[in-house]
Image (spheres, rainbow, N blue to C red):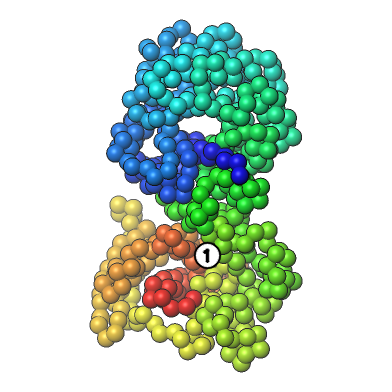
Amino acid sequence: MKKIMIFDSMLRDGAQAEGISFSVNDKLKIVKALDDLGIDYIEAGNPGSNPKDLEFFERAKDIELKHSRLVAFGSTRRPDISAADDSNVQSLLKAATLTVAIFGKCWDFHVTEIIRTTPQQNLEMISDTVSYLKQHGKEVVFDAEHFFDGYSANPDYAMHCLKAAADAGADNLALCDTRGGCFPKDVYEIVSKVRETFGDKIGIHAHNDGGMGVANSIMAVEAGANSVQGTFIGYGERCGNANLSTIIPNLQVKLGYSCIPDDMLQFLTSTARHIAEIANVILLDKMPYVGKSAFSHKGGMHIDGVAKSAVSFEHIDPALVGNERKLLTSEVAGRMAIVSHIQKVDASLAKTSPETERIIRRVKELEHQGYQFEGAEGSLLLVIRKELGLYKPFFELINFKIIGEQPYRENMSASALIKIMVEGKPEITAAEGQGPVNALDKALRKALEVFYPSVADMRLIDFKVRVMDSASATASIVRVLIESSDGPDSWSTVGVSHDILEASWIALVDSIEYKLTKDMGQKL
């Protein structure tokens, strides 16, 4: 089984994505997650570019990694100055990582028009920088920036750039599709030609501007590359980098390469969700392998087929990557979708059981009222428990009061006062929030934490409101869908009412009850 080195650039290239800003603590948490998963290299930032990365590398000196190597990233030296006198190159040494990644121009257009130097000077910049870092005992990855565009325009010069790095001692030549516009066939052909000259110390660094970052990375490996650069869950500038959470299982499960330890594949999905939480970005449901919809089935024929034989509609066993099959409840899903959820609570119940018939009737009644359980499995499982007589509420609402504030004060536009009862014990508390639902959520959880400390681990990560009857305007029935997470797990709940606060309350209570039921070890 051939080993493919996995090089994650989440903390450098991923940090350049729109809407993402990692703190130093965020970076340290992501390093731990990637190291636990078994990623070989973690490119952690450019110590010469900003104080945050400087602080990270200083704090990272105390980290003990089990598997990964941290990588400091920078550019070749500037024109007309030696590597020894270049402050950015010196910052790479101060980062004290065993491995450094250096990018250099490989497209003559960029050399003459962007950095405005001569082709020969550019070759000297590459050679001098790599040689200098090797003299200081560093493992050097040369990121051949714009290599594929440069090769297409002037193959001889692009290859001279690689030779300059290789002759200076570069340990790996990462061929970069910096603009992200290459096609898999072209990548395969070019990597094959490069391998004829430079052997197997070749890597691929693909961007996703043409939607082919993953395909280009896999074709590069098939052509002989021995390392893949990308970002976990695909974050990156513009349309993102090649998605490692897709590439790893494609290479390891489908093609027989070794990317991470076999026993760590099962943590692929939980790691993706954990990193998305840290980045404060919702993990796309439709992301291959790790998304919530990756193994979801809605059509009745699909559900029936999967129930008879999973391979009929699933390309791998979801458990291999730590994900799970979901049979969605909807008007096109058929009876088996609901039965599959019922059997999560009571495996003895069959398609024709009286209890099953009763639950299906109840679900249909709720759907007629405006509920939709396709995206609210948490609420559906609680409905099933109620119909089976297994439900016992964890608390009772006595009353709550919402107070709106105008103008806004310190970003808080509402406050909530709430009184609940838990096993005969009352608890009254209040909280401020950014809107009435946020205030109510914070007040409720603050009260419940007195009795159930684990509630502090959960938070709302998404909140959607759907107007069911636009003709009724503000008197319309609304459906509120809430997605919650406690880190390793996430779930969705739904509430329906003419009153948006009541609909929000119903979904919020279901969310907390789902969490507490799960924590008590009861079947869901």
x, y percentage for residue 523? 47, 78
Question: Would residue 415 be found to the left or right of residue 275 on screen?
Answer: left
Q: Which sits in the foreground, 438 or 143?
A: 143
Q: Please indicate, yes or no, whether residue 313 appears anywhere in the rendered image.
A: yes
Q: Which sits in the foreground, 478 or 363?
A: 363
Please tell me how many numbered marks the rendered image carries.
Answer: 1
Q: Image quadrant for the N terminus?
A: top right
Q: Quadrant of residue 368?
A: bottom right
x, y percentage for residue 303? 69, 71
Query: Farthest bottom residue?
Result: 354
Residue 372 vertical position relative to residue 234 in the rendered view, above or below: below
- Residue appearing at x 43%, y 41% in the figure: 68
x, y percentage for residue 358? 59, 89
Residue 399 vertical position relative to residue 239 in the rendered view, above or below: below
Q: What's under tag 1, amino acid-wise?
A: Val
- Residue appearing at x 57%, y 45% in the figure: 258
Q: Which sits in the foreground, 316 or 346?
A: 316
Q: Quadrant of residue 289?
A: bottom right
As helix, strand or loop, the secondary structure at mark 1 comes to strand
Residue denoted by label 1? 465
Query: Farthest front residue?
Result: 1
x, y percentage for residue 190? 70, 27
Q: Residues within 10 Å of mark 1 (few under 14, many from 20)?
A: some
Question: Would residue 436 be found to the left or right of residue 262 on screen?
Answer: left
- Residue appearing at x 33%, y 70% in the figure: 444
Residue 385 vertical position relative to residue 508 in the rendered view, above or below: below
